[in-house]
Amino acid sequence: MALSPNNNAAFLQEVDEAVRKDRIDRIARNYGRWIVGGVIAALMAFAAYLYWGHRQDIARGEKGEELIAALEQVKGNQPTAATAALKKLEGEGNPAYRAAALIQQSNMKAEKGDIKAAVAMLAQVAGDTKLDQSLRDMALVRQTALEFDTLKPQAVIARLKPIVDAKDPQSSWFASAAELTAAAYYQSGQFDQAGALYGRIAKLPGVAKTLQSRSVQMAGMLGVDAITDRAAESAKADTNKAAQSAAGDQKGTPGAAAAAKTEEAK
């Protein structure tokens, strides 16, 4: 007797489910232990990763406390204990804490007049590619400042050129590097380059007032009117601010609404 269409569909569905079940059973028999083992291994690896991250966080916290303790010893005029603590941090492998330890030891050496040792420590930080670029730039600027009187002007200019020329993004240590470079240009008789660089420093937003004042004076002495440039920029900023304020005051007026609709239509 022929099956009706409905019975035929049900029969085919039962056959399909039986085939699927048989396939799953076969996979489970042949590969079940491997699958379970793989899942367990993955879970164990994930747990190990979480534990490793937790231990790393704890270790970073411990290193931070050790660094703070060493700095307190420096402030407390305990150089021997501070040096021992900083040496320990320096040798334990973490690049950031190693850099901090070297920089602080460099400061201590410089204060004692041991410029050679201070410079060597800063050079290690400046050359460490595992560190953030801003930290390396800071070390290089500090190193150059300590060595400035013993370096030829062209050596200063060449060394700091990557920091001075950086544009995208500009180095956070541009102002300090630019002042040293401008001084080197001045010493070598390249007064146009020195004046232009002092002018750039003078126009920087947020630059330290003392550095800005020195830069304005040096730029003016070299024929660059940084005061006028800053005044023009300040006036332009004030005009833009006033325009924005006026636009804000006009919001909600019929004229402003009409202007907004016209702009949307465009």
Image (tube, helix red, strand yellow):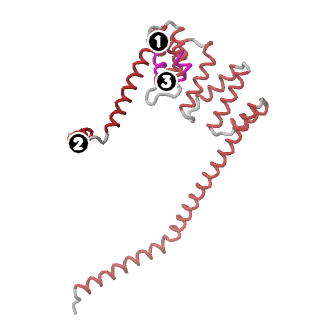
Q: Which of 238/9 is in front? A: 238
Q: Which of 213/122 is in front? A: 213
256 up-or-down from 107: above or below: below
On the image, numbered disc 2 is attached to which residue? 261
Q: Position of residue 33 (x, y in %)?
A: 53, 70
Q: SS at mark 1? A: helix
Query: What residue type is disc 2 on?
Result: Lys
Question: What secondary structure characterizes most of the magenta part?
Answer: helix
Q: Residue at x 65, y 29 (%)?
A: 103
Q: Position of residue 16 (x, y in %)?
A: 33, 78
Neighbor class of circle 3 (other Cα within 10 Å; few <14, some 14-19, many 20+) is some
Q: CA distance from mark 1 to mark 2?
A: 50 Å
- Considering every residue shown, the one lying at the far top of the view is 189
Say whether disc 2 or disc 3 marks the residue closer to the N-terminus: 3
- Magenta segment range? 199-213
Q: Residue at x 34, y 37 (%)?
A: 249
Q: SS at mark 3? A: helix
41 up-or-down from 82: above or below: below
148 up-or-down from 19: above or below: above
Q: CA distance from mark 2 to mark 3?
A: 49 Å
Assess whether residue 31 is covered by the magenta stretch: no
Q: Residue at x 36, y 26 (%)?
A: 239
The C terminus lies in quadrant? top left
**56 sits to left or right of 228:** right
Camera-near label (2 vs 3) is 2
Query: What residue type is disc 3 on?
Result: Pro
Say whether disc 3 or disc 1 marks the residue closer to the N-terminus: 3
Q: CA distance from mark 3 to mark 1?
A: 19 Å
Q: SS at mark 2? A: helix
On the image, numbered disc 3 is attached to which residue? 162
Neighbor class of circle 2 (other Cα within 10 Å; few <14, some 14-19, many 20+) is few
Q: Position of residue 141 (x, y in %)?
A: 57, 23
